[in-house]
Amino acid sequence: MTSSFIDYYRCPEEFAKFVPVKELGQAAGFFRFGKQITCFGRSAGAVAKKPGDNLSDALSLMKSEAGGITLPFDPNEIVENLRKERYVASDAESSLPKKIIRKAYYTARPLLPVGIRKHFQRFHLRERRSVPFPSWPIDKTVDHLVSALMAVSVRANQGRRIPFVWFWPNEYQGCVLMTHDVEHEEGRAFCGDLMDLDARHGILSSFQVVPEERYGLSDAFLESIRARGFELNVHDLNHDGHLFQSHEIFQQRARKINEYGKKWRAEGFRAGGMYRNAEWTDALQFEYDMSFPCASHLEPQNGGCCTIMPYFAGGLVELPLTATQDYSLFHILGQYSIDLWKEELDCLASSNGLASFIVHPDYVIERRARLVYENLLQYLSEFCGRAKIWQPLPRDAAKWWRERNQMRIEGSGDSWKVTGPGSERARVAFAQLEEGLLTYHVETSSCRESIA
């Protein structure tokens, strides 16, 4: 019942004193845990078919006793339901009319300039902004839920602080990833200039390249990305919007996608259009995936994984998209400034989360958009230095999360250390309550040493 909590914090199991409720309802639905945390799953209380303001609050059903904390739901189930988007109505994206419209759109898409496409997309997304759940532009429901459980655990521990493995290496307070999805021939041709621009600001990024049909790819082009210290990943198969149309089609294409991954020595994958199906990702033979937005109000497929932290999706590390895409910012919202990106970055950094960006080379060729992107790079350089935010390649962030998942906290009393491969970069952190609010304190010495 506590594996999602333990995996999130990497704290000793002795502090996860949750015990299962005897009976849960048969049907999954929406309910609240406290005033602001929307959950989806089975509960010992009432559940609703849709999210909204009048949901039943399960907090009143929680009991704290000597033997542990009895929750009126299974936190593993709730976290998995959110991350795998099981709260989305099953027919929301799969009805026949929607399939026909999607097929027609992607057939015509290569012939439609951005000025025409954006009007179709604005119409398609016209009602998304009013969706109550997940919240836009960033949804932290999973993070709020596990932190609420940590606060409950601290209280059950007589208020004493609880040790855990800090989220990021070397006391970094958060993480920023810059990624570039290459969509068209014009974007492929601009990649060299974009690498120059990133390098001038000290940022190394990843380039996701479409293997088939979209544009020509030479070995020299692919090697030029790796040779300059940037990362090369696989971006869909042909970016036609049909990768997840059926399980049979997905399996056929996944085999080809995996072959390209091995050929290119690529560790990461992202689906075209951020289309996704969490139940099928085991077919992808990569170290990590980047196809799940935390809230997808401006994406073709609605939903969202509701977290700003990496997590495991089967054997993959999932690095969720947490910032608005450049295309959405410029052409859906009509904003040519970094104000929204700055707000998102502040929101993510305040929770020590992952800030992941998609900036397409295709959409920053035009001078006005490119100047906005340059402003973002300059702001990131200053912000990350000031706030001590980590700026790795995506593969390095995924590697760290994989290593962290194998680390353990050992010790007792006020003396704790982290053990396991990679622990020389890890730090002990403590969760504690200050004036009733959960706060974190990170020890600054190496976790290979005992901390008094």
Image: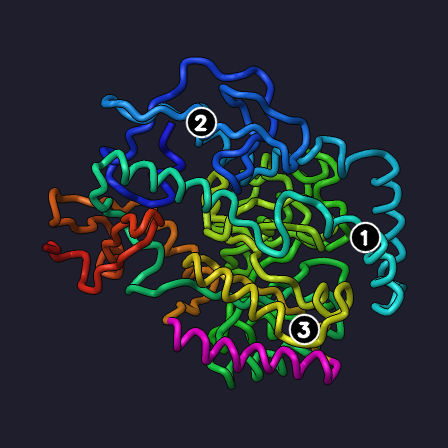
Total count of labels: 3
User: Please, what is the three-letter code of the amino acid marked with disc 3?
Assistant: Pro
Marks 3/1: CA–CA distance: 26 Å
Dot 1 corresponds to which residue? 126
**What secondary structure predominates along the stretch shown in magenta?**
helix
Disc 3 versus disc 1: nearer the observer? 1
Disc 1 versus disc 2: nearer the observer? 2
- In this view of the protein, which residue sits in the foreground, 269 or 34? 34
- In this view of the protein, which residue sits in the foreground, 387 or 252? 387
Marks 2/3: CA–CA distance: 51 Å
Its colouring scheme is rainbow
Quarter placement of the C terminus: bottom left
User: Please, what is the three-letter code of the amino acid marked with disc 1?
Assistant: Arg
Q: Please provide percent x and percent y for residue 440.
A: 31, 54
- Describe the element under mark 3 as helix, strand or loop: helix
Q: Which residues are magenta?
A: 366-387
Which residue is painted at 55% across and 61% down in the image? Answer: 264
Would residue 259 be seen by someone viewing this image from the given angle?
no
Q: Please provide percent x and percent y for residue 400.
A: 36, 56
Q: Please provide percent x and percent y for residue 193.
A: 63, 83
Q: Give the crowd class for mark 3: few <14, some 14-19, many >=20 residues within 10 Å.
A: many
Which residue is painted at 41% across and 14% down in the image? Answer: 22
Residue reaching furthest front? Answer: 435
Which residue is painted at 43% across and 63% down in the image? Answer: 175
User: Please, what is the three-letter code of the amino acid marked with disc 2?
Assistant: Ser
| Mark 2 / mark 3, whichever is N-terminal | 2
